[in-house]
Image (cartoon, grey):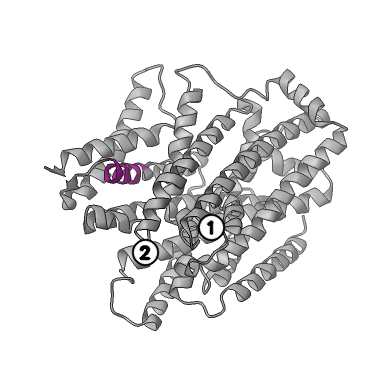
Amino acid sequence: MNPIFVGLILGVYFLALLGVSYYTSRNANNQTFFIGNKNSNWVLVAFGMIGTSLSGVTFVSVPGTVGTGGFNYFQVVIGYFIGYFVVAFVLLPLYYRLKLTSIYTYLHERFGFHSYQTGAIFFIISRTLGATARLYLVINILDLLIFHNDVTKSTNISWSFILISVVILLMILAYTFKGGVKTIVWTDTLQTVFMLGALLITVGYILTKMNLGIGETWSQFSGLGYNNMFVFDVNSKDFFLKSILGGMFITISMTGLDQEMMQKNISIEKLGNSQKNMFTFSIIMVVVNFIFLFMGGLLYLYATQIGVDAKGDDLYPILAFQKMSPLIGIVFIIGLISALFPSADGAITALTSSFCIDILGLNRNQKSELQNSNTRKAVHLTFTLVFLILVIIFKLINDKSIIGLILKVAGYTYGPLLGLFAFGILTKYKLQDKLTLWICLAAPVLTYLLSTYLETAGFDYKIGIEVLIINGLITFFGLWLIRKK
């Protein structure tokens, strides 16, 4: 696709986001940036959170999994659905009762300052690694599809890769710099519309092109085994009970204990509306993930019909750009960008909020609003630069297995958060606060050693998605050992 044409699409897209930013950031202050002055519309938050939850990697990866795993991923989605109810009826009431701006302030009130900063540090590390890894992967796709650069080269960073990285991060900085959460609630809603539109247009195009109905398509899925959802092999990493429990705890940890996701929820004035937001969001998420899987099956059927041997993450991009109408190529670009921006803009904003409140103590100091605002802007700029540096580092490494490892390590860091919050909610014990950090550092290491041992020792059982649960349990046990009697 012509780079100038893609640049035009990006320019129009960015102008729309900038217009929303201008409208929402008028008379903005620090409270606007951090929690949207607690007057966000719960319907907008629910819809916009879809874009935040589904990254650009999900946009191309979930459809690609159908060829090897069928609809197995839907087991995890069921777990997500259950987890959202735990967030809505256990965690949200806690956050609203304590009137939190940063959810990690709970750890301060419950255990002490060191536990509080430990929770914030684990969030900052995890979200930074996870968000920049996803950003890198999408920028790599854009570089390949637009400028046709060989993304397999391990040491060659093209000017186009750096250009795309800088442009995207500057765009995010421009429309989030002043309004923060208040702006993101609206821009994420707009971008979710674009992303879901791209999804539905692609599905409609393939159904029309192949002259298929929904029922006939499902019958073909059944014949090829694409519609298999549940795995009953206990030793499999995709065993259904393991997947459902893993999905549930992923939601509890990566939504309910994540400042980026909760920042939008607690920007809603009333708890009841925030819970309605979570319930609505959970239903939409189930439907959207099912449509992604359905599209994946369609893409494989279409590829087989026209004789294209494409699989996994390459399936959707190759078909959209090389084997479908040019309109679908444009739709794919818009959908990919719309999935990319919400996962990156929310991360930078949440990281800025957490660092300012939890590490620098903006809510605790006696400085003026202007001084705190200048500090917040400097932190925002710094995190944008950190994102750029990490994206370039990932490009230099350029090993998919290492990117997978980075994302896995980021997931490991939510285990200590899960253990900390669970210990606070489920017990009445205080902790020897200064030892909390050491327990939270030891838990992921022990979890990794256990996982490695099971693999190298030849056991049939393999640790999969439940690694988060094991990590959280080890943290919980460690905190039990340092409890104050």
Dominant SS of magenta comes to helix
Kindly identify which numbered label has been placed on residue 344.
1
Residue shown at the point (25%, 57%) measured from the top left: 109
* Mark found first going from the N terminus, 1 or 2: 1
Q: Quadrant of the C terminus?
A: top left
> Which type of secondary structure does the marked residue at label 2 adopt?
helix
* Circle 2 crowding by C-alpha within 10 Å: few under 14, some 14–19, many from 20: many
Relative to 46, residue 304 above or below: above
Kindly identify which numbered label has been placed on residue 355.
2
Q: What type is the residue that disc 1 sits on?
A: Ala
Is residue 416 one of those drawn in magenta?
Answer: yes
Residue shown at the point (35%, 41%) measured from the top left: 415
> Which of these two is toward me, 189 or 318?
189
Label 1 – label 2 distance at C-alpha: 16 Å
Q: Quadrant of the N terminus?
A: bottom right
Kindly identify which numbered label has been placed on residue 204.
none
